[in-house]
Amino acid sequence: MSQSLSITPFTSVDLPILADYLHTSKLLLAINRFLILDWPNEPAQRKRCTTAVQGSLDDPNSECLKAVDIAAGDIIGFAVLTRKHPLKDEDAPKQECSDFMNPRVFESVMQGAEDLGKSVQDLDRYDEKHLHVDCSSSHRRSGVASKLLDVFKDRCRAEGLPLCTQSEPAAFQFFLNQGFKDDGHCDFDLAQWADPNSGFGVFRLSGVKWVPEEI
């Protein structure tokens, strides 16, 4: 389906719907069933998602964009691009475990993300921090995410910098289709936290990187 989109900066007025898109995407992640205590713990998760989007909006190093269906006037996706400079180990920010999270799972996830990040922490680069689209049937696979990502690619191409992110399993093939390269992964065996014979297996977090042709 072809859509006419307007891609512009989002503001605090847009926070409720953007946080809802983020929250919906997090509900789909198998690992979050073990990370979040009293699953699905809607109040805590919604507050967490709102705080995350607000944090991007408040970050002077981030570009925050929304995609709007021009015909309907609806926001149907958003994305955040964050400028990153080479990072010394002692400068790396440390996140604290919230009281609604399982500390063991949190520590494992943070360590995995940190290990993946080591391959790019010395790079002058941009990070794609959020890329979420309305999951309703009318907007899935309509090219919204690709168009948001194209804006970020243009920025990276103009500045001659790579674009990096850490991908959840469902988005990994999308990034490969967009020209990103696999830059390593970290596997989490969900069976270690699950009840016996409950069907949970490996959850993979992947590092991906897109490099402009000119570099």
Image (cartoon, rainbow, N blue to C red):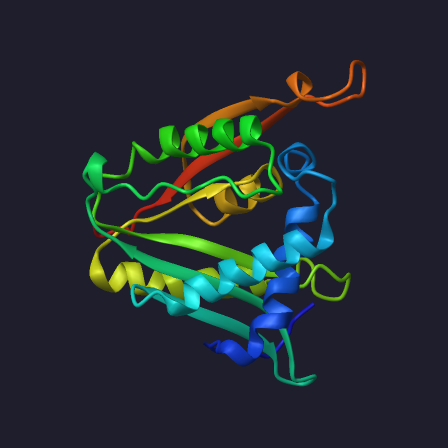
Q: Is residue 190 above or below residue 166?
A: above
Name above or below for residue 120 compared with residue 26: above
Percent across and percent down for residue 5 are 57, 77
Residue 205 position (above or below residue 187): below
Q: Position of residue 17 (x, y in %)?
A: 64, 70
Q: Position of residue 164 (x, y in %)?
A: 36, 46
Front residue (pair 64, 46): 46
Q: Name the image quarter holding residue 165.
A: top left
Task: Identify which residue is drawn at 60% across, 63% down.
Answer: 19
Which is more toward the observer, 102 or 117? 102
Q: Is residue 139 left or right of residue 96?
A: right
Nearer to me, 74 or 37 = 37
196 horizontally vs 89: left or right = right
Q: Which sits in the foreground, 153 or 12?
A: 12
Extreme residue toward the right, this view: 197
Answer with left or right where residue 129 lies relative to residue 83. right
Q: Residue at x 76, y 66 (%)?
A: 138
